[in-house]
Structures are given as structure tokens and as C-alpha cells.
Amino acid sequence: MDFVDADGFARQLGTALNQAELPETFEVTQVDCMGSCSDPTSVALQGIGRASYLFAGLSARHDIDDIIATCREYLNAPDGWIEDARGCGRLRFCLKARIPAL
């Protein structure tokens, strides 16, 4: 697994999301702790009225395309609830939590 500084990962991810031409925008926000110390590179997805997801153990070098694919699946899923995660690539194996919409 490759580790990059948080700023570098956030920049890479933000650039990739902007270039992906998704139908909605995603905001990349850094936080100090996602509670996944053993798998430090984490991404969470959340939206109003949508399920929330936490993925950890990600690789900035290898998982950007799967993060984009997961964002696409998230937008296409009713209420953000992804039923078939095969389209998420390796991220389906990095899922730490899936929380239903409130």
C-alpha cells in the first residue's frame, strides 16, 4: 500500500472528481481522524437523504478510479444505497461501514 500526505491525496482526489464529469459535485474535506488508524487512507461518502459509507485502507496510487466509480454508483443508487457493489471495484472490499439514510 502506498501512503501519501493527506494534502496530496485530497488534491489528487479532488482533481479526479472534477475531471470525471459526474452529474453532481463532490466536496473533498480533510478531517484529522476517521477512526480507522490501522487503515489510515480513508474516504467517506455522505449526502442529505442518502446512505453514508466509510472506506479505509485505500491507495492513492491505485484506487482513484474505483473511488470515482463508487461515486458514480452512489449517485445512481436510490437514496445512495448501493445494492450491487461490483461496480465499485476494489472499494467493495475496503468498506468499513454503511449507514442507512436518516
Image (spheres, rainbow, N blue to C red):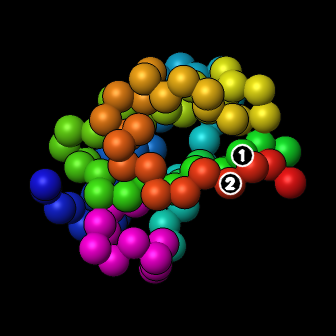
Quick check: is 93 in the magenta stretch?
Answer: no
**Residue 4: quadrant of the picture:** bottom left
The residue lying at 54 percent from left, 57 percent from top is 97
Amino acid carrying mark 2 in the image? Ile
Residue depicted at x 17% and y 62%: 3
Question: Looking at the magenta stretch, what is its main secondary structure?
Answer: loop
Q: Position of residue 32 (x, y in %)?
A: 46, 79
Q: Secondary structure at mark 1?
A: loop
Residue interval drawn in magenta: 32-42
The residue under label 2 is 99
Residue displayed at 25% across by 48% down: 60
- Position of residue 50 in the picture relative to residue 39 (left or right): right
Pick the quarter of the image with the C terminus. Answer: bottom right
Quarter of the figure that contains the N terminus? bottom left
**Residue 23: image x %, image y %?**
66, 21
Q: Residues within 10 Å of mark 1 (few under 14, many from 20)?
A: many
Q: Which mark is residue 51?
A: 1
Res. 75 mark: none
Counting from the top left corner in percent of width and height, residue 78 is at 77, 26
Q: Quadrant of residue 22?
A: top right
Q: Are marks 1 and 2 in contact (CB under 8 Å)?
A: yes
